[in-house]
């Protein structure tokens, strides 16, 4: 399991004040809102296993397993390939995702995305042009119930205070993955 | 255009429609279907077409689970197979898995026209096995026109009474012009609840299981 940026640990150190993702938006790049503090899994990184964290995360590499960011947003960038069930506060998909998405706040599937899986969230948006095969739970009550129970189950399954060092690239300005993420909102 | 189902479902449909939006095609049986959803309760809706923001918007105001399969991707394989058992296997693989909560509504749009009769039988049988008794299927059949676009069109709800056809550019091909008798033979578990001839020459059907 990979822990991302536990607060108060050196791994969660400050990110550069100005990142290209914030300052050089481009229409051809991902337009999902990526925080300047977001951790980045770069295009050359492959992770097999569980990814958990307490900061926003941008995936431009490949992840297989599960991804859980209960209070933060996850962006799967245009180069990202995720084969995993994903649990996050907000989920933005520009790339490829195979698995179920649980967003406690929202799920946004952009036109460049390819998604095969089910989406459960109180707020779901899908842009025309996106490739999507699966189901969207649009019953607010059912969405709340499912997301709540899934999040709880994931939390209880998480080991306590055994955070290994992260295998996640920090968002350095010179890093290609960050430069390719484009506009931040 | 991205459409947030939850947000827009609170406002009137017209508010979300761009001022330049096309008129759309009046579809009384689609309207009838939406009216039934207004009766309340939870619904499971299977859309055989591609995901479209307008479809999400149209169903965003209901307590429903919306499933998309984009059946057009598998048409060639289904129509190219002659062994009924393998057609059935292919259709099963394209459709979502059977769940404890069966399907209430199927949106076929114009896809039935693009299935030959053995494939039509297999697909609709596989869908029926995922539906609850009394489920409804909405379909559009080329009736007057002898030709139809080479590939299925995209249909999106304009509001709860009209749908818009976006034709895929390209050549045309002969339309099978399935008659109600053809449909009854290929879809024995479905009965035609109502049929209406639309302004564009297509026959709109509401089937019931």
Image (cartoon, coloured by chain):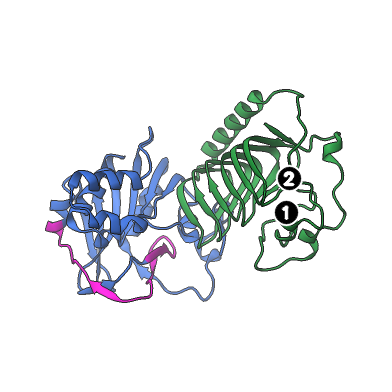
Chain colours: A green, B blue
Residue bearing mark 2: A56
In the rendered view, would you say A31 is above or below A171? below
The chain containing the residue under callout 2 comes to A
Count how many numbered circles sit on residues in the image. 2
**Which quadrant would residue A181 be assigned to in this image?**
bottom right
Mark 1 secondary-structure assignment: loop
The reply, left or right, for residue A40 in relation to residue B155 is: right
Q: Is residue B36 visible?
A: yes
Q: Is residue B209 visible?
A: no
The reply, left or right, for residue B186 in relation to residue A79 is: left
In the rendered view, would you say B203 is above or below A61? below
Q: Residue furthest front?
A: A44
The chain containing the residue under callout 1 comes to A
Name the residue: 24% across, 57% down: B79
Frontmost residue, B60 versus B161: B60
Name the residue: 18% across, 48% down: B83
Marks 1/2 in contact by CB < 8 Å: the verdict is yes
Query: In x, y percent, where is residue B208?
Result: 24, 47
Q: Quadrant of the N terminus of chain B?
A: bottom right
Which span is picked out in magenta? B154-182
Frontmost residue, A109 versus A82: A82
Name the residue: 54% across, 53% down: B5
Name the residue: 79% across, 61% down: A20
Query: In x, y percent, where is residue B148?
Result: 27, 72
The reply, left or right, for residue A43 in relation to residue B171 is: right
Residue bearing mark 1: A34
């Amino acid at each position: 399991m990979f822990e991302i940026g536990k607060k108060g640990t050196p791994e969660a150190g400050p990110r550069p004040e100005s990142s290209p993702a914030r300052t050089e938006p481009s229409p051809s790049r991902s337009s999902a809102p990526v925080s300047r503090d977001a951790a980045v899994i770069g295009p050359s990184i492959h992770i097999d296993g569980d990814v958990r964290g307490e900061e926003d995360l941008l995936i431009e590499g490949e992840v297989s397993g599960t991804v859980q960011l209960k209070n933060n947003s996850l962006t799967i960038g245009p180069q990202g390939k995720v084969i995993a069930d994903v649990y996050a506060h907000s989920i933005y998909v520009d790339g490829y995702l195979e698995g179920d998405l649980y967003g406690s706040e929202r799920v946004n599937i952009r036109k460049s995305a390819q998604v095969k899986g089910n989406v459960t969230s109180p707020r779901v948006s899908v842009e025309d042009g996106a490739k999507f095969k699966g189901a969207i739970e649009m019953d607010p009550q059912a969405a709340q119930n499912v997301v709540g129970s899934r999040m709880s189950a994931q939390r209880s399954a998480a080991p306590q205070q055994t955070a290994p060092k992260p295998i996640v690239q920090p968002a350095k300005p010179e890093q290609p993955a960050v430069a390719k993420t484009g506009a931040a909102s | 255009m991205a459409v947030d189902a939850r947000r827009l479902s609170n406002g009137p449909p017209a508010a979300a429609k761009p001022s330049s939006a096309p008129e759309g095609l009046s579809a009384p049986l689609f309207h009838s279907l939406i009216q039934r959803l207004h009766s309340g309760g939870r619904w499971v809706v299977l859309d055989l077409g591609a995901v479209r923001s307008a479809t999400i918007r149209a169903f965003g105001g209901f307590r429903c689970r919306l499933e998309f399969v984009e059946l057009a991707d598998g048409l060639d394989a289904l129509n190219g197979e002659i062994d009924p058992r393998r057609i059935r296997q292919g259709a099963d693989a394209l459709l979502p898995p059977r769940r404890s909560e069966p399907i209430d509504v199927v949106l076929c749009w114009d896809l039935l026209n693009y299935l030959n009769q053995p494939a039509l039988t297999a697909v609709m049988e596989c869908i029926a096995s995922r539906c609850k008794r009394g489920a409804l299927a909405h379909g559009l059949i080329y009736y007057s026109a002898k030709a139809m676009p080479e590939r299925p069109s995209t249909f999106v709800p304009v509001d709860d009474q009209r749908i818009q056809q976006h034709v895929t550019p390209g050549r045309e091909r002969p339309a099978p012009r399935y008659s109600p008798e053809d449909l009854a033979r290929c879809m024995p578990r479905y009965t035609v609840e109502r049929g209406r001839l639309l302004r564009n020459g297509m026959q709109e059907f509401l089937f019931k299981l």
